[in-house]
Image (cartoon, rainbow, N blue to C red):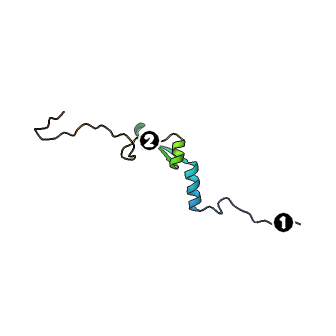
Amino acid sequence: MAISRPVTHAVEGSTLADILERVLDKGIVIAGDIKVNLVEIELLTLQIRLVVCSVDKAIEMGMDWWTHNPNLCSRAPARNLPPEPTDDPAVKNP
């Protein structure tokens, strides 16, 4: 006697939250190149690299550029920018 069982699919119980959790946990990389040529002369090349993952996964992969940017992280060292030029004759411009 054969026992019938329902067929289950991998996507059956996946919600958007499940998919997002999996992508952020494992990470995903999207890469592409776009080249614009005119009469065999390359005018423009765009190299696109997109990494989507959680912050923890990014740090695990060695990506931590935001920790060095003072606009994104309060613990990042401030950049020493030269003073802005002024029209005030009392202030000597470099």
Residue 42: horizontal and vertical position, in percent? Answer: 41, 37
How far across and how far down the image is residue 48, in percent? 46, 44
Residue 27 drawn above or below residue 15: above
Residue in the image at 89% along x and 66% along y: 1
- Which quarter shows the C terminus? top left
Q: Earlier in the sequence, mark 2 or mark 1?
A: 1
Q: In the displayed structure, does residue 24 sit left or right of residue 13?
A: left
| Of the pair 81 and 4, the residue shown nearer to us | 81
- Residue 58 shows in the view: yes
What whole-number distance in Å separates the C-alpha atoms at marks 2 and 1?
A: 57 Å
Considering every residue shown, the one lying at the far top of the view is: 94
Q: Position of residue 87 (x, y in %)?
A: 13, 41
Residue found 57% across the figure and 55% down from its top: 21
Q: Vertical placement of 85 versus 11: above or below?
A: above
**What residue is pinned by disc 2?**
65
Residue 47: give x, y in percent of width and height.
45, 41
Residue shown at 69% from the left, 61% from the top: 9
